[in-house]
Image: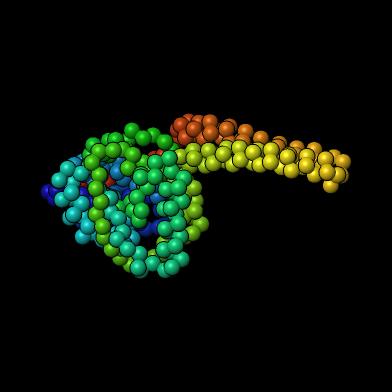
């Protein structure tokens, strides 16, 4: 029996993916499969694989199936695990093969996440989901029950000893990227809103500064009024618009602070539902 297993996660695909996984599992007990009942997105599919494998391994390494992550980095990850690290991140050493647009948008993505994060050090530049996690780190991850899932931000918050391995990313073997700009923006928004209420604080602060500006405008309008350089009613209308607008925005920010926290805590929908698991005994669950 081999000392490692390879789990493929089928995220509710509509093509021949699961049939291919079944054939691999039938030919070699090294290969196992997890089929989700419906497509639940990349992060939930990844979590399903991690939670399925955590009972059967001392450590689990996750990677995308596009073969761009350099498998040679696995050896160094394992060495760092044996040296005491519970979490080892696979970090891209460079982006020379990316187009300027891809490189710019990717770097902007990480900068935005770091700016809006309550804990910027938990945002690891040029790290996706290629990482090693020990069993106890996986059990720590299982304690995080939020539905609005962003693993790249949650896993650093688990703690324990953490390390990184740097590698050069390969060209895609087949297919096209499933993360164009639109999805990257949506992913960034999910990462920000699932980990932080900082945007709400920014809105609240913006409303406060607008309100302060309205006081300055009040003084300006009063000077113009008493010097006879304005028409009757213009000053009161302008000040009202500025003051009320600032107060409304500040109020929305304060309410949003609480709503944001409630939003992060109260959703308890299933993150994924597993339809079938193929283990080394070809058991179907």
Task: Determine whether 145 is above or below 83 in the image.
Answer: above
Can residue 285 be seen here?
no
Number of callouts: 0
Where in the figure is residue 36, as x and y percent of width and height?
Answer: 38, 45
Residue 40: % across, % down? 43, 46
Instruction: Give left or right: position of 93 versus 221.
Output: left
Q: Is residue 79 above or below residue 167?
A: above
Q: Is residue 216 shown above or below 98?
A: above
Residue at position x 66%, y 42% in the image: 213
**Nearer-the-camera pick, 227 or 261:** 227
Taking 228 as reference, is 7 left or right?
left
Q: 211 and 277: which one is in front?
A: 211
Q: Position of residue 212 (x, y in %)?
A: 64, 38
Res. 119 image quadrant: top left
Q: Quadrant of the C terminus?
A: top left
* Quarter-of-image position of residue 240: top right
Quarter-wise, where is residue 259 in the image? Answer: top right
For image coordinates 71% across by 36% down, the residue present is 244
The residue sitting at 30% across, 40% down in the picture is: 51
Q: Whole-percent x and y of residue 106?
A: 42, 58
């Amino acid at each position: 029996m081999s000392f490692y297993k390879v789990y493929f996660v089928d995220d509710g695909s509509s093509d021949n993916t699961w049939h291919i996984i079944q054939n691999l599992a039938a030919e070699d007990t090294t290969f196992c499969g997890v089929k989700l009942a419906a497509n639940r997105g990349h992060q939930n599919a990844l979590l399903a694989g991690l939670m399925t494998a955590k009972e059967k391994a001392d450590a689990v390494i996750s990677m995308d199936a596009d073969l761009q992550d350099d498998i040679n980095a696995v050896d160094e990850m394992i060495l760092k695990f044996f040296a005491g690290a519970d979490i080892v991140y696979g970090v891209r050493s460079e982006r020379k093969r990316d187009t300027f647009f891809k490189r710019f948008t990717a770097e902007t993505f990480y900068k935005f996440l770091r700016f809006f994060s309550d804990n910027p050090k938990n945002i690891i530049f040029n790290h996706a989901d290629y990482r090693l996690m020990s069993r106890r780190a996986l059990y720590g991850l299982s304690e995080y029950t939020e539905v609005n899932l962003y693993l790249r931000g949650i896993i650093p918050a688990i703690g324990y000893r953490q390390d990184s391995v740097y590698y050069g990313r390969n060209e895609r073997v087949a297919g096209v990227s499933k993360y164009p700009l639109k999805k990257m923006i949506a992913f960034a928004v999910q990462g920000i809103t699932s980990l932080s209420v900082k945007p709400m604080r920014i809105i609240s602060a913006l409303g406060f500064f607008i309100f302060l500006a309205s006081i300055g405008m009040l003084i300006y309008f009063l000077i113009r009024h008493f010097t006879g350089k304005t028409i009757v009613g213009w000053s009161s209308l302008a000040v009202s618009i500025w003051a009320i607008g600032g107060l409304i925005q500040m109020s929305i920010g304060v309410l949003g602070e609480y709503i944001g926290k409630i939003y992060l805590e109260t959703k308890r929908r299933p993150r994924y539902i597993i339809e079938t698991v193929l283990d080394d005994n070809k058991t179907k669950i």
